[in-house]
Image: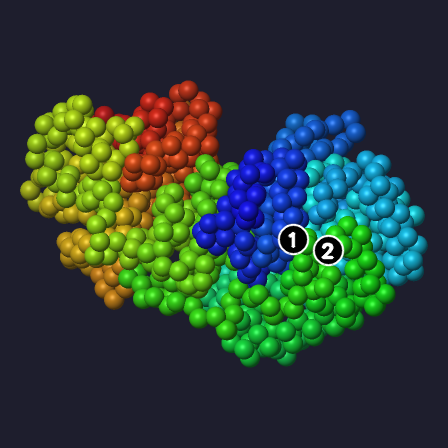
Amino acid sequence: MTLRTDLEAAVRGAVDFTDRRRAEYSSDASNYRQVPLGVVFPVDADDVAAAVAVCAKHEVPITTRGGGTSIAGNAIGTGVVLEFSRHMNRIIDIDPDARTATVEPGVIPAVLNAELAHYGLRFGPDPSTHARCTIGGMIGNDACGSHSVAWGRTSDNVVSLDVLTYDGTRLTVGAGGVATPRTDRAAEIHTALTALADTHRAQFRTELGQFSRQVSGYGLHHLLPENDTNAAKALVGTEGTCVIVLAATVTLVPLPAEQRLVIAGFLDSEVAADAVPAILAHQPLTCEGMDDRILDVLRVRRAGSVPELPAGDAWLLIDVDSAEKARTLTDALRGIDGVRGVATVDDPAHRTAVWKIREDGAGLATRSPEGTLSWPGWEDAAVPPSNLGAYLRGFHRLLERYGLHGVVYGHFGEGCLHVRLDFDFGSHDGVGRFDEFMRAAGELVKEHSGVPSGEHGDGRARSELLSALYSQELMRAFAEFKAIWDPHGKLNPGVIVDAAAMTEDLRIDPDRTWRRPPTTLALHEDRGQIGTAVHRCVGVGKCRTLSGGVMCPSYRATRDEKDSTRGRARVLQEMLLDETVTDGWRSDEVGEALDLCLSCKGCKSDCPVGVDMATYKAEYLHHRYRGRLRPAAHYSMGWLPLMARLASRMPKAVNALTASPLSRVLKRAGGIAAERELPRFAEHTFLEWYAAHRSPGGGQDAPRGSVLLWPDTFTNFFAPHIGVAATEVLEAAGFEVLTVDRPRCCGLTWVSTGQLGVARRMLRQSLADVAPVIDAGVPMVALEPSCAALFRSDATELLPDDEGAAVVAAHTYTFAELLARHAPDWAPPAVDGHATVQVHCHQHAIMGSGQDAALLRSTGADTRVLDAGCCGLAGNFGFERGHYETSVKVAEHGVLPALASSPPDAAVVADGFSCRTQFEQLVGVRSRHLAEVLRDALPERETR
């Protein structure tokens, strides 16, 4: 029997050896790529044991994986990957009195901490990936995070581990060595560990545990008698090379009674580093550093949206646990040379915004403001904090010598720096320079009593450097330690012991030939290269978070890597490599990966590196079906604007038909989900109302001039009352409202179904209609957020050489933006009560919702903007056959519970047609466009 069939027979969880799945797990967040034989998703510890037994029988290597956020390449392998995040994510026990928790390895720390908050406790270590990494992965890397100055590393917070060896032995280990069970194999391991510590105690005492962030290598000093012969702590940081962790008992810390964020601005990052020892004397909870280059990237990514910081070109973010400490620290900082400004942040929203910059550092640092790709590798070095300033100066000189550039940030209070550098992996000379630089950097960090890894582990990125860092005797001890647990070397081979070369298995390899297919969309930010675009994804995995923002709604519904932005990017990368996924644009593997992509565009804004999967999906569908028969939904919904134009000639008859039993036949023929109710066409279109409403020679009472209202398909044919409301509000605000004289479409529905040629033609027609008015200085307002987003963003991708597209992009506004920009002194009517706002995904991604919230609050409404994700309908997605269940799950995951928690009298505001339709069809909630809310509040004398 084969490995796969044996696994399928033995394991209750899924066993997946498909090319698509192998592509998804071919890399983590590192520079490295290894395509596994297959992936197993065990459901519990017994399932893990069964899978390991089969792999041992076939002598196949095993790599364990949680969130796949490893930056060092320690979560990939050529054998079988055991994936713990899907099923083995249970919190087994919480003991608030003992302040401990027992968890499975796939538990996400943020999820655990949400539960612990009820007890006033938390798990201390908090890496920036705390919302998507797993505790098993943190144990593998000995992860730390920003609060490690107060709460330590993962190894400082582990009580015991339940582990499994490759030979099938299950043990519980902790202080005192091997605790249970007392088998011959357990006794053998215990004896061997004791002998190892006796033999190498001098090296353990003099070379290991020398400062708080010394993570490189194995933490064998924990085996010393003075450290309680703690086998659990010694196994933390072994990166899955010795045992497989089945469960962990960890210690908990009390939540601080209060927290204050002090931000200090410095002349530069080197001066900031010099100040660290003095700051540590104040016992802060955190001391994080970043410089102005990360803000430059942020300004490019978010069009200038950067939280306010005190004066300086580098900053330390210092958390303390009392207002008194904040005052004392602030006074002390003002007396330090090189400090340019100090501020204490009390506003929770401001605090969150500042910390978000730091948490997104790994992604933001991936691209320079000019668009140059940067890579990890030397992203995790650590030195004693007292040596940080000198090390940083030497490091900057080293970068200058090699002509490299990067954004330095990280845990200054622990002497641990993160940086991504613009290595050239696309040429042999570049790879050679990478290797040379890494060795020189290793020597530099050693000179400053540091190590190559302060929390990410050595992995494939730095394990080769260990032999130059540590003595030969200590390296032998590492090998002996691994052999005690894994004598055949089958657990995560090539890491720490018998290290693979740093230049092996690079994801970008000059010896590989990548496809460079031409694209229809311009892909301006990626110089027209789909390869550059999909390689934006470096694997940080923010798309795997379960709350906040929009990205990635389908992953939140399925918890399947296939449905994450990262998983899709990996499959597209493999398609371009043409090794695992080999049929180019027509690869079924890519189709499967993109099937549940809602084209919400959430990743364009929420992904730290700006992956735009909606655009890549449109490009893929365009090529896949070019000259071929398309899915029925591409015709029924892609051509909706033209069908709506026909239906509007006899709306009553069409509505009667779509509400009759014959609708089942229509849905089946159109590829529409049987569960969906088809939207009803309005009896009169907005343009018909406008023609009757418009008075000859209008504009005489328009002190603010004219505004062009775009009559999108959804407003014109399905919700003309919104266009009416917007017109009445704009006229009350002093505008003359203009529109086009015939139905037009921006091309949105054709873009979302990948019919890019038709989309271009439709867009050109629309631009021809509006360009003369806009050229005359008239701004355009688009009531449907997805149409506004197309004009603002996609239009210049579809028509890159059309000056009209660029002009329209610069002069298109949402309803709230238009009023804020062109009627800033207008006093909106008073709105009583509460308002709950659901922001359309495309608006979230392209325009943002700040003006909407500000406008509503200015009316006096108690405004709450939901941060609960996508509604799940997402244009055509939720109407397509086969997508209904996912559409509902997306809604039920976040936004429907959020709506249910709103005050009963709250006005639900949703500018998007999809959002309003989903809410009404799933839970019977009628929501209104912002224009309706304002119109309904206008004094009677101003309504028309």
Q: Amino acid at mark 2?
A: His
Q: On the picture, is 760 further left or further right than 121? A: left
Q: Secondary structure at mark 2?
A: loop
Compared across the picture, whether 31 is left or right of 659 comes to right
Around disc 2, counting alpha carbons within 10 Å, would you say few (fewer than 14), some (14 to 19), or many (20 or more)? some
**Mark toward the start of the polypeptide (1 vs 2):** 1
What is the x, y in percent for residue 581?
42, 58
Residue at the spot x=71%, y=56% of the render? 489
The kind of residue on which mark 1 rests is Glu
Q: Which residue is mark 2?
A: 488
Q: Is residue 351 above or below residue 577?
A: above
Vertical relation: 59 (above or below) 717:
below
Q: Image point 87% across, 58% down: which residue? A: 204
Could you tell me if residue 911 is visible in this image?
A: no
Q: Are marks 1 and 2 in contact (CB under 8 Å)?
A: yes
| 930, 857: nearer the viewer | 930
